[in-house]
């Protein structure tokens, strides 16, 4: 049965400090939970209004599920998984790095893009939103199970990187006219400020996504939208 201690634990995991303290995070929805159950992630608790899982679970009512759900309209299941131990970053191939991306929806979409375009490693600055934030987890739709994410001092990491570092800027070279390599690090910046000046100083190749509108009045693209274009171009060449 659902207990007060269960409710207290799951409610606390809405906050990053408690996720880090407990090394646990929440996943909602049958499809998403099944993705995690079929991965290397270790299950801690599983609650559902239906017996649709091949795993130990606690059956709850719709009203009980509302008490532990982060969604306005709760799905039929809520699970708690263990946060995995950090893995060594693989520097081979193409990597994506995020310089202080703050919006959970953007990060979740970018993780899905990494999964789609075969980017195995996502490097995040320490100020980037937590990938185990429930909104991020929900937006990834299971892709979090297939992309290794590491939070680092981004400047220190890029400063010791031997591969080319790519970044998008208004005054960069037209990405559609560039010959792009199969390996390197692509940096995407903050939603409001773009790539920070210290990180910009480490970028070895500046790229731009040209505007084709007649007025060219749009100042910038959403970071997830820009990431999809950049990753597509790198994979196309």
Image: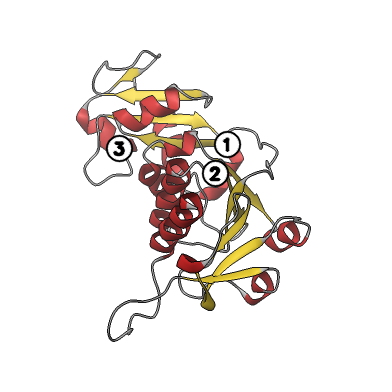
Asked whether residue 8 appears in the rendered view, the answer is: no
Name the residue: 70% across, 69% down: 202
Q: Position of residue 155 (x, y in %)?
A: 71, 63
Q: Which quadrant of the figure has residue 164? A: bottom right
| Label of residue 22 in the image | 1
Give above or below for 168 relative to 129: below
Q: Are marks 2 and 1 in contact (CB under 8 Å)?
A: yes
User: Label 3: which residue?
Assistant: 67
Q: Position of residue 150 (x, y in %)?
A: 62, 46
User: Label 2: which residue?
Assistant: 18
Asked whether residue 73 appears in the rendered view, the answer is: yes
Lateral position of residue 63 relative to residue 178, left or right: left
Nearest to viewer (mark 3 / mark 1): 1
Q: Within 10 angstroms of label 3, few (less than 14), some, or many (20 or more) residues?
A: some
Lateral position of residue 106 relative to residue 172, left or right: left
Q: Position of residue 166 (x, y in %)?
A: 60, 63
Q: Position of residue 51 (x, y in %)?
A: 26, 15
Alpha carbons under labels 3 and 2: distance apart: 18 Å
Q: Which quadrant of the figure has residue 127? A: bottom right
Q: Within 10 angstroms of label 1, few (less than 14), some, or many (20 or more) residues?
A: some
Answer with mark 3 or mark 2, whichever residue precedes in sequence: 2
Q: Within 10 angstroms of label 2, few (less than 14), some, or many (20 or more) residues?
A: some
| Tag 3 secondary structure | helix
Residue sitting nearer the eye, 28 or 69: 28
| Label of residue 74 in the image | none
């Amino acid at each position: 049965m659902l207990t007060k201690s269960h409710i207290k634990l799951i409610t606390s995991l809405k906050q990053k400090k408690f996720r880090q303290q407990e090394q646990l995070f929440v996943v909602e929805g049958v499809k998403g939970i099944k993705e995690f159950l079929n991965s290397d992630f270790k299950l801690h608790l599983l609650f559902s209004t239906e017996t649709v899982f091949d795993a130990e679970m606690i059956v709850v009512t719709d009203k009980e599920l509302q008490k532990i759900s982060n969604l306005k309209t709760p799905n039929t299941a809520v699970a708690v998984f263990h946060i995995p131990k950090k893995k060594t970053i693989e520097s081979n191939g193409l990597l994506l790095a995020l310089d202080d991306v703050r919006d959970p929806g953007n990060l979740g979409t970018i993780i899905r893009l990494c999964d789609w375009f075969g980017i195995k490693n996502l490097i995040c600055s320490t100020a980037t939103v937590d990938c185990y934030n429930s909104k991020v987890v929900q937006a990834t739709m299971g892709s979090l199970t297939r992309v290794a994410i590491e939070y680092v001092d981004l400047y220190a990491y890029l400063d010791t990187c031997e591969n080319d570092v790519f970044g998008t800027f208004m005054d960069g070279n037209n990405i559609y006219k560039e010959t792009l390599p199969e390996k390197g690090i692509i940096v995407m910046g903050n939603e409001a400020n773009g790539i920070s000046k210290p990180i910009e100083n480490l970028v070895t190749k500046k790229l731009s996504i040209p505007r084709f509108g007649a007025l060219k009045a749009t100042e910038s693209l959403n970071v997830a939208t820009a990431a999809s274009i950049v990753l597509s171009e790198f994979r196309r060449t």
